[in-house]
Image: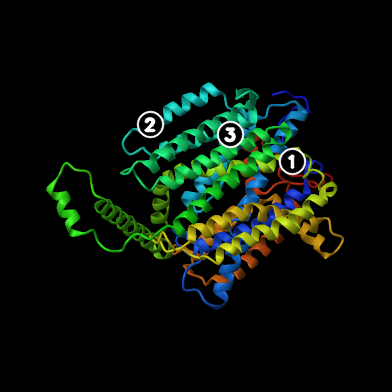
């Protein structure tokens, strides 16, 4: 390691901090807490099922407010901030002429360890490990070598064929998707198409669209072909064609690629969910009657013939019923362990489920990458470094993006606010798709509101009080899980099942205490405890913790 001060790896001092990031991070931590606390009092399996059924009065109002004004808006803010932190660290390394990848990979590894420990020993709603996986995918996107990516894909596909390891196919699919995105960001090669030059990325999408269109025609023409894929494949062909044309049109300038790719990936993911939900919601209902006896008899008479439609439907219903029964059993077991079981049982349950989380995070990483790229653009474009010079942008986000994003979610709530597992026609997937689409503009709108408040000359500027809690975000996030697990779970004080309205009160009290503690701690220390540990591992040196009177206040991003 170079001993020169300009290249020594160390956390930056206070003058290098971007105050707006700390304030937004503190604000996001409150929203995360409001969302997470529900699942210290409810099975984690309920994530994605909307509002609990049977709520009334203030409990219903609290659940509704959090579902449409909080949920989904704050993990996206945190993801945005994670991308900003990545860009800050990268930019400073570039300016100082020092290595970036090695310390950042240690930073990811440290976060993965925190996340795995958090998941197994405290709470299975962890997102830290997800961020570590997403950050690893981001490095592949930006720096991955093509031969190594191809080799990794081949190995993952091979492993997927091993019995019991088929979830690895999902990891391979996520890696393939990330490598495709990297073509848009990093490859300048162009392909001639009908006398017109288009970027390689656009050419690939157009070819995929053409192949999907051919497959769609075959599915619609074949009289005995499968019916289920017809609409999805047709939609996919149109989407690929449109994205191919748009990516060719908006491939330049290179400085906007991160922004455009981030918005496009996020929108594409949840637009497809919305379209699929709409197709499902408006599709003809399957007949509730059992298969005709004559059809079953005919099939039994000819054992070598293909299963009839009636038999296929019966088989699907039987498999779905089995899955629902297993799910209900898992929920009952989880509730029993967390509400009245022993700590060892809870740890064993979460450790057993952890491999499923790893596989799921590989798919989730594709969405996280979108937010990371957006956050990176906000920093590398100079917007966050000088928020005062970009207030018109933040006003647009606050006054246009925020109501638009919240409005999409509220529109979805008119269709459905909760989902009954097994009911494919209740409209919840369509409603959730609209809400998820709205989460991106809503989260950007919230960032705009916080920045405008920070620059206000009124009482709203007091939001800067959240900066210390944002500087200690990792410590405070983990502390929230410690407090909630000890208060709500059966191996702690056993207050499982706190009413939703009282959960809000609980959050406000604990968060106020965290704000006060963060101010007290950072008046004496440079870092939060977990931030100190994380940075010591990242930079391979032990930074001084205690402040001296003449040092001023220092911290790391």
Residue 262: x %, y % from top left: 64, 41
Provide the secondary structure element on which disc 3 rests. helix
Q: Is residue 275 left or right of residue 524?
A: left
Residue that numbered label 3 is attached to: 181
The vertical placement of 92 against 220, above or below, is above
Sequence-wise first label, 3 or 1: 3
* CB contact under 8 Å: marks 1 and 2: no
Q: In the rendered image, is residue 48 in sight? A: no
Sequence-wise first label, 2 or 3: 2
Residue 44: x %, y % from top left: 46, 58
* Residue at 84% from the left image edge and 59% from the top image edge: 456
Q: Which of the two residues, 80 or 234, is positioned nearer the viewer here?
A: 234
- What's the CA distance linking mark 2 and mark 3? 24 Å
Q: In the displayed orientation, state which residue is furthest to the right.
A: 457
The vertical placement of 247 against 517, above or below, is above
Q: Is residue 293 left or right of residue 274?
A: left
* Crowd band around label 1 with a 10 angstrom C-alpha radius: few (<14), some (14–19), many (20+): many
Residue that numbered label 1 is attached to: 379
The quadrant of the picture occupied by the C terminus is top right
Q: Nearer the viewer, mark 2 or mark 3?
A: 3
- What's the CA distance linking mark 1 and mark 2? 39 Å
Provide the secondary structure element on which disc 1 rests. helix
Residue that numbered label 2 is attached to: 159
Q: In the rendered image, is residue 119 in sight? A: yes
Residue 147: x %, y % from top left: 52, 21
């Amino acid at each position: 390691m170079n001993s020169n001060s300009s290249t020594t790896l160390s956390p930056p001092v206070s003058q290098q901090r971007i105050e707006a990031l700390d304030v937004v991070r503190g604000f996001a931590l409150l929203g995360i807490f409001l969302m997470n606390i529900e699942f210290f009092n409810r099975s984690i399996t309920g994530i994605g099922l909307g509002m609990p059924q049977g709520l009334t009065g203030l409990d219903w109002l609290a659940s509704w407010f959090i579902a449409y004004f909080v949920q989904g808006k704050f993990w996206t803010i945190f993801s945005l901030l994670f991308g900003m932190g990545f860009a800050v660290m990268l930019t400073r390394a570039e300016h100082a002429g020092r290595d970036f990848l090695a310390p950042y990979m240690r930073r990811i590894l440290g976060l993965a360890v925190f996340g795995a420990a958090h998941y197994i020993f405290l709470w299975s709603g962890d997102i830290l490990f997800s961020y570590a996986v997403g950050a690893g995918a981001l490095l592949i996107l930006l720096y991955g070598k093509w031969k190594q990516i191809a080799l990794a894909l081949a190995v993952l596909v091979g492993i997927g064929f091993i019995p019991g390891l088929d979830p690895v196919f999902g990891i391979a699919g996520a890696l393939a998707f990330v490598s495709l995105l990297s073509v848009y960001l990093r490859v300048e090669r162009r392909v001639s198409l009908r006398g017109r030059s288009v970027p390689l990325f656009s050419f690939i999408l157009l070819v995929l669209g053409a192949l999907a269109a051919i497959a769609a025609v075959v599915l619609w023409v074949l009289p005995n072909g499968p019916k289920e894929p017809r609409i999805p494949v047709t939609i996919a062909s149109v989407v690929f064609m449109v994205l191919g044309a748009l990516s060719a049109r908006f491939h330049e300038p290179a400085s906007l690629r991160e922004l455009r790719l981030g918005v496009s990936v996020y929108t594409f993911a949840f637009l497809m969910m919305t379209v699929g939900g709409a197709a499902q919601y408006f599709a003809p209902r399957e007949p509730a009657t059992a298969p005709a006896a004559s059809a079953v008899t005919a099939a039994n008479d000819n054992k070598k013939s293909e299963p009839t439609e009636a038999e296929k439907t019966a088989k699907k219903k039987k498999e779905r019923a089995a899955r629902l029964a297993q799910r209900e059993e898992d929920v009952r077991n989880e509730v029993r362990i967390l509400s009245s079981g022993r700590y060892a049982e809870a740890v064993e349950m979460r450790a057993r489920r952890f491999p499923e989380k790893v596989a799921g995070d590989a798919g989730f990483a594709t969405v996280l990458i979108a937010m990371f790229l957006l956050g990176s653009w906000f920093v590398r474009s100079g917007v966050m470094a000088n928020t005062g010079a970009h207030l018109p942008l933040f006003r647009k986000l606050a006054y246009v993006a925020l109501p638009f994003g919240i409005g999409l979610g509220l529109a979805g709530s008119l269709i459905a606010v909760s989902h009954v597992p097994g009911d494919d026609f209740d409209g919840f997937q369509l409603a959730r798709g609209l809400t998820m689409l709205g989460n991106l503009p809503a989260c950007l709108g919230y960032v705009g509101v916080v920045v405008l408040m920070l620059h206000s000359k009124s009482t709203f500027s007091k939001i800067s009080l959240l900066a210390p809690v944002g500087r200690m975000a990792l410590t405070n996030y983990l502390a929230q899980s410690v407090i909630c697990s000890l208060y709500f779970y059966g191996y702690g004080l056993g207050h499982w099942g706190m009413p939703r309205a009282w959960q809000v009160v609980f959050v406000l009290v604990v968060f106020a205490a965290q704000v006060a503690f963060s101010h007290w701690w950072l008046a004496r220390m440079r870092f939060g405890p977990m931030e100190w540990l994380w940075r010591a591992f990242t930079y391979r040196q032990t930074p001084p913790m205690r402040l001296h009177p003449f040092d001023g206040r220092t911290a790391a991003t």
